[in-house]
Amino acid sequence: MDKKVVFSGVQPSGKLTIGNYLGAIKNWVELQDEYDCYYCIVDLHAITIPQVPKELRRSTLEVLALYMACGIDPDKSTIFIQSHVPAHTELTWVLNTISYMGQLGRMTQYKEKSRRSEENLNAGLFTYPVLMAADILLYQTDLVPVGEDQKQHLELARDLAIRFNNKYSETFKVPEPGIKDVGAKIMSLQSPEAKMSKSDADENAYILLLDDKDTIRRKIKRAVTDSLGTIAYNDEQLGLKNLIEIYSIFSGEKIPSIVNKYEGQGYGKFKEDLAEVVIDGISNIQEKYNYLMDNKDYLEKIYIKGAEKAEYQALKTLRKVYKKVGFLPR
Ligand code: AMP
Ligand code: TRP
């Protein structure tokens, strides 16, 4: 029997945070044996916000190296760059024609981004979720492991699959979201009511996968907590709640056991230990990353092979779609 299909992606815009890792990439690693996995570096999505071309090229390679450093194995999973497979943009066009303006206008991420970037309110920002739907639907994806913030986009991908299937007959698999209970939304270290984001203006709000040890210690020490001063896991102490979750996922220790261990103590010792847990959790990743970035020829081989494999699958779906909408074959 054929394995079920997993698809996910990260934008190569800036550096990856531990939010990207805990909310997404770490979970991808666990799916590799059981599923046929496609892990994409979504550079087409990245240009919806202004990018410096030279830096985009570098970030794309960095994200590829980070995927592998985090444990994505190119012998098990297909790792590729979105712009290398033109079928993504081609299917986007077709899906655009069955997408409702109203529904796209209601996307939270679009509303937020358009509020923040009025001078760059381009059409790409608006149709961004349609491109994401194309990414997913091209591979007849069963499961999409992402962080909480992508839930609404996934709903749209499901809607578009169903709408197309109803209009033209069964074509797309309707994908399921894979969102974890803990870790799906790692919060900002400075304002714990907002998600940790690599585009945050305040560097202290996030920890990068490539931050050095002292930076990690400093950022955790400065992380916003509260004036209650006692270790507990609840919604009144959002900053602390977030730190406990980060501790739990990196260490594998259950939340109640962590709370127990630090009960009655102030935040100082907990934060010191947390910094070491995080450093421990990512030092291996950094080591592998540095090695891979010194071997660019190898990285190139991986993404070339990945694009070939992805394209083969993507074209199967695209051909079906073109036939169903009535395009005359060449
Ligand atoms: P992005 O950085 O927007 O390309 O996100 C890539 C993946 O990381 C998506 O699956 C996001 O849902 C996930 N992600 C990003 N930020 C966070 C966060 N703060 N907590 C959990 N997951 C996140
Ligand atoms: N929009 C996603 C994000 O910003 C990235 C993404 C693009 C994606 N295409 C995807 C995630 C397909 C999962 C599946 O996080």
Image (cartoon, rainbow, N blue to C red):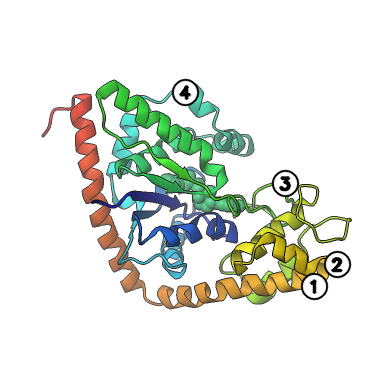
Q: CA distance from mark 2 to mark 4?
A: 51 Å
Residue 95 in percent (x, y) is at 35, 30
Q: CA distance from mark 3 to mark 1?
A: 24 Å
Q: Which residue sits at x=52%, y=47%?
A: 179
**Residue assigned mark 1:** 269
**Residue assigned mark 4:** 101
**Nearer mark to the viewer, of 3 and 4:** 3
Which is nearer the N-term, disc 3 or disc 2? 3
Q: What's under tag 1, amino acid-wise? A: Lys
Q: CA distance from mark 3 to mark 4?
A: 30 Å
Residue 260 in percent (x, y) is at 77, 65
**Nearer mark to the viewer, of 3 and 1:** 1
Which is nearer the N-term, disc 3 or disc 4? 4
Q: CA distance from mark 1 to mark 2?
A: 7 Å
Q: Which residue sits at x=18%, y=30%?
A: 323
**Residue assigned mark 3:** 193
Residue 123 in percent (x, y) is at 46, 32
Q: CA distance from mark 3 to mark 2?
A: 22 Å
Q: What's under tag 3, amino acid-wise? A: Glu
Q: Which residue sits at x=37%, y=43%?
A: 136
Q: What's under tag 2, amino acid-wise? A: Gly
Q: What's under tag 4, amino acid-wise? A: Met
Which is nearer the N-term, disc 4 or disc 1? 4
**Residue assigned mark 2:** 266
Q: Is 88 situated above or below 22?
A: above
How many residues crowd mark 2 within 10 Å: few (<14), some (14–19), many (20+)?
few
**Nearer mark to the viewer, of 4 and 1:** 1
Q: Is 154 situated above or below 229?
A: above
